[in-house]
Image: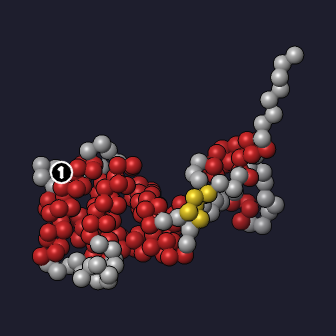
Amino acid sequence: MATRIIKPISALFPVTQNDFIRGNRRLAREKALQVLAACETSGIEWPAIFPHIIMREFTFDIEEERGKPEKLLSPAEVDELEADTAIKWEKDEVEFARDLIVATNNVRDYADKLVEKYVQNWDYDRIAILDRILLRMAIAELITFSEIPPKVTVNEILEIAKLYSTDRSNTFINGVMDSVIEELTTDGKIQKSGRGLT
């Protein structure tokens, strides 16, 4: 007689799992990158994407918004809910992600021109989209967030590049950022203050 394997309830109903990780600045930067990349490729404004990526607020059925009864989730919808581990955010981490997105959008044109100046033998439009966004994020963080040391900003962006972009992105971004930081420092655009920064 064959042995019957009984699956745990969580395997049968994966959406009921309570697995989560705690948010931090690195994750906030990663999620900011995801929001900015989604905006870049879709043309949708960031406030519409932010709750879905940061807070995992899913809306699968427009009819639910019109007051009709909720329906059971389809297998594809359950897969989307479970595709990413839930993150428990502190309020300041969510605010950091939001502020980084806004700052990145605010410096976009300036950052693009600055980067274009230092990319040798490259047509700017041929640079990987994620690399462009990561460079914008780094420049925004250097200029806007006075409490974050430049080394921390660059190290964080390089680590995220290793996870999300091409094999050569890390070296490329590091080389560009050396020149960018030198110019920003010379122009007095990097104003850092706080413990260990002055």
Q: Residue at x 37, y 55 (%)?
A: 160
Q: Secondary structure at mark 1?
A: loop
The vertical placement of 193 against 134, above or below, is: below
Q: Position of residue 10 (x, y in %)?
A: 74, 46
Query: Which amino acid lies under the numbered mark 1 shown in the image of this protein?
Result: Asp
Residue 189 against residue 118 in the figure, above or below: below
Q: Residue at x 71, y 47 (%)?
A: 14
Res 186 → quadrant: bottom left
Total count of labels: 1
**Residue sitting at 14 percent across and 69 percent down?**
182
Q: Nearer the viewer, residue 106 or 189?
A: 189
Residue 156 point in image, percent of width and height: 35, 61
Percent across and percent down for residue 20 are 61, 57
- Residue extending furthest top? 1
Q: Is residue 87 left or right of residue 33?
A: right
Dot 1, crowdedness within 10 Å: few (<14), some or many (≥20)?
few
Q: Residue furthest front?
A: 196
Q: Is 97 positioned to the left or the right of 104 in the image?
A: right
- The scheme the figure's colours follow is secondary structure
Image quarter hosting the N terminus: top right
Q: In the picture, residue 109 is in which quadrant? A: bottom left
Q: Quadrant of residue 100?
A: bottom left
The residue that label 1 is drawn on is 123
Residue 149 in percent (x, y) is at 29, 72
Location of the C terminus by quadrant is bottom left
